[in-house]
Amino acid sequence: MAAEKNELMEKIVSLCKRRGFVFPSSEIYGGFAAVYDFGPYGVELAKNIREAWWKYMVQLREDIVGLDAAIFMHPKVWEASGHVGGFSDPLAECKECHTRVRVDHLLEEAVVAADEKMSETAINQLFSLNKERIVCPKCGKKNFTEAKSFNLLVQSNLGNFTGNLGENPVYLRGETCQGIYVNYKNVLDSVRVKMPFGIAQIGKAFRNEITARQFIFRTREFEQMEMQYFTRPEAEMDEYEKLRAYRFQFYLDMGMKAEHLRWHKHENLVFYAKEAYDIEYQFPFGFKELEGVHARGDYDLTQHAKFSGVALDYLDPITNEKYIPHIIESSVGVGRMFLAFLTEAYTEEALEGGDTRVVLKLPKKLAPVKVAVFPLMKNKPELVAKAKEVFDSLKGNMMCEFDDNGNVGKRYRRQDEIGTPYCVTVDFDTIGQGEDKTLENTVTVRDRDTMQQERVKIEELSVYLQKYFN
């Protein structure tokens, strides 16, 4: 089973490179560890994932508004949040080959429950108890240093011309939610929101990961989609359960199978949290965190009020009650959701004659290309001209691709691999040069999943296709 899972992961990685979804960053220079670039189809899939999340979290919700906070923030933000003092992973070093590893990951692979939120003492106790079961992933030896906490914030020299990064350090943000917390008062004062309400944001975050791994699952530069929901203190847990249900339903609505998803409750909570659950997805390497849903209490606003000196209380306009709102959050990475949808969609089907086709059965609304338009033959100018005309009539309403490279069968396979739901072929019947004159001004529409074909009038084609994407 493990070999099958590894094989699936290798196939997905290969497809991503071969078909222009994901490339290693700076590849011509040998790559840059744990950083990736989205290619032409990857950038479209990622955009569609963001738009689907935004629609679900903002457009369909009257109680949630959007924000786009800056990546750079005042350094005191990260002191107040606890990141400067406590945003760390447990690091150990192999004494034989000097490879640095995350101890919680080594324990996890040895089937020992551990996570990065455990104290240094607690994780070293587990590390010591299980040292005979843990081997270096590079050299296979069992000789490690003790675990030490390693801060994950990435420092910058923004505004610092001394050359000393330790003097008045500025950080690339380690998470996007702090931008929401420090703008809570601005939103409250400028937009007609009332308790409870949420603020959603999509943006880049950066972490100096020790051992990033598993392709785009864990990277040093990534994009987060987060929503912070502000509630009355006594309503926090009721709203938390509503958010948990709402976020789980999102994945079901997007076509993921229920058996590929599960809840995982955090046993080691940060001191201020009331409860924390992860939605886990069955990736090729097993069930892993896809999205976190957390009840954070009033810690965040209390800290920022303390460090900034600005009151962040909420004054109830009806009861005149004043309180610090409690916060529940939903947080998911674009890259992880991208990988989850690729895993869910990747399909190999046996065809007649012993052939196999690879097809990405992505939800139609997520597909990078919605419709591919083909001329039956590219050396017939009249077919190409008509196909271009059809392409031009569709491209204003949906992402389309014009493809005349190779025979139609090869084009179908290429579009299957990138997940294109529909292929439209212009043939001799379309331009009135076929035997059946009743088919003039019609095209063949081929369905990705069923491979069934249907003749559709060109004048009705746009409406016919759009009904599947709305």
Image (spheres, helix red, strand yellow):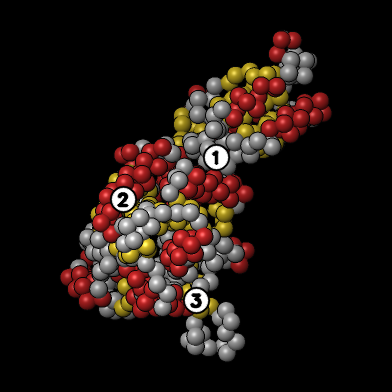
Residue in view at x 54 percent, y 67 percent:
70
Question: Which is nearer the eye, 323 or 396?
Answer: 323
* Amino acid of disc 2: Glu
Q: CA distance from mark 2 to mark 3?
A: 31 Å
What residue is shown with label 1?
Answer: 367
Q: Which numbered mark, 1 or 3, is in the foreground of this view? A: 3
Quarter where residue 123 is shown: bottom left
Label 2 close to label 3 by CB (< 8 Å): no
Q: Which numbered mark, 2 or 1, is in the foreground of this view? A: 2
* Amino acid of disc 1: Ala
| In this rendering, position of residue 139 left or right of residue 44 | left
What residue is shown with label 2?
Answer: 239
Element on which disc 3 rests? loop
Residue in view at x 53 percent, y 68 percent:
71
Classify the position of the C terminus by image quarter: top right
Quarter where residue 153 is shown: bottom left
Residue 113: x and y in percent read 23, 61
What residue is shown with label 3?
Answer: 74
Residue 327: x and y in percent read 34, 60
Q: 10 Å neighbourhood of mark 2: few (<14), some, or many (≥20)?
A: some
Q: 10 Å neighbourhood of mark 1: few (<14), some, or many (≥20)?
A: many
Residue in view at x 77 percent, y 27 percent:
386
The disc, 1 or 3, on the residue closer to the chain's N-terminal end is 3
